[in-house]
Image: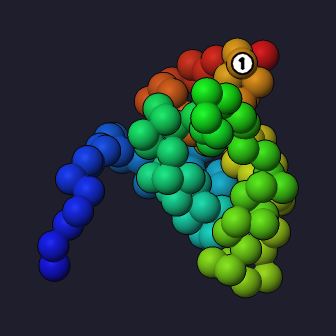
Amino acid sequence: MAMKNETFYCLKVELGIDTCEEVTAIERHKHGSEYLWLWIRLALKYANYGGVLCRRIGDQVLPVTADDLEAEMKGGFTDVSIKDGVATLIQGSLIYINSDGFMATNPEPLGTGKRDQQ
């Protein structure tokens, strides 16, 4: 298979992420496994933006909202609200609101309690 775009982005995952308290707490929710899959997909999708959920239109950088994600990703999840998943991930500290008001995937190693919260 020939690849036209040879730009690669890395997603660094720490050892033990599957047993940290934040992930374990999300797993206990009714749709916890789907919410964790959503978190992984968001981390991969926005890795080239440093984990910040945004989109660029020309020179503008716009935040991605839970409504945007619901419209964009609904086909990948059955019986699960993407908006509920985002709210659960924010509550569980796997997604945070950065100082610019954008949602972002976790900037610090999980289990440290360090966040750029407002």
Instruction: Single out the residue that lies furthest toward the front.
Output: 58
Q: Residue at x 77, y 55 (%)?
A: 68
- Tell whether 75 sits left or right of 10: right
- Tell whether 46 sits left or right of 98: left
Q: What percent of the width, then of the height, locates residue 69?
A: 73, 58
- Secondary structure under badge 1? loop
**Residue 20 versus residue 38 in the image, above or below:** above
Residue ID for mark 1: 100
The quarter holding residue 55 reads: top right
Colouring scheme, one of rainbow, by chain, secondary structure, one colour = rainbow
In the rendered image, which quarter contains the C terminus? top right
**Residue 19 versus residue 98 in the image, above or below:** below
The quarter holding residue 2 reads: bottom left
104 or 88: which is nearer to us? 104
18 or 52: which is nearer to us? 52
Q: What percent of the width, then of the height, locates residue 63?
A: 72, 36
- Tell whether 84 sits left or right of 72: right
Q: Residue at x 72, y 44 (%)?
A: 64
29 or 3: which is nearer to us? 3
Asked if residue 29 can be seen in this view, the reply is: no
In the rendered image, which quarter contains the N terminus? bottom left
34 or 49: which is nearer to us? 49
Q: What percent of the width, then of the height, locates residue 60?
A: 67, 29
Instruction: Single out the residue that lies furthest toward the bottom.
Output: 78
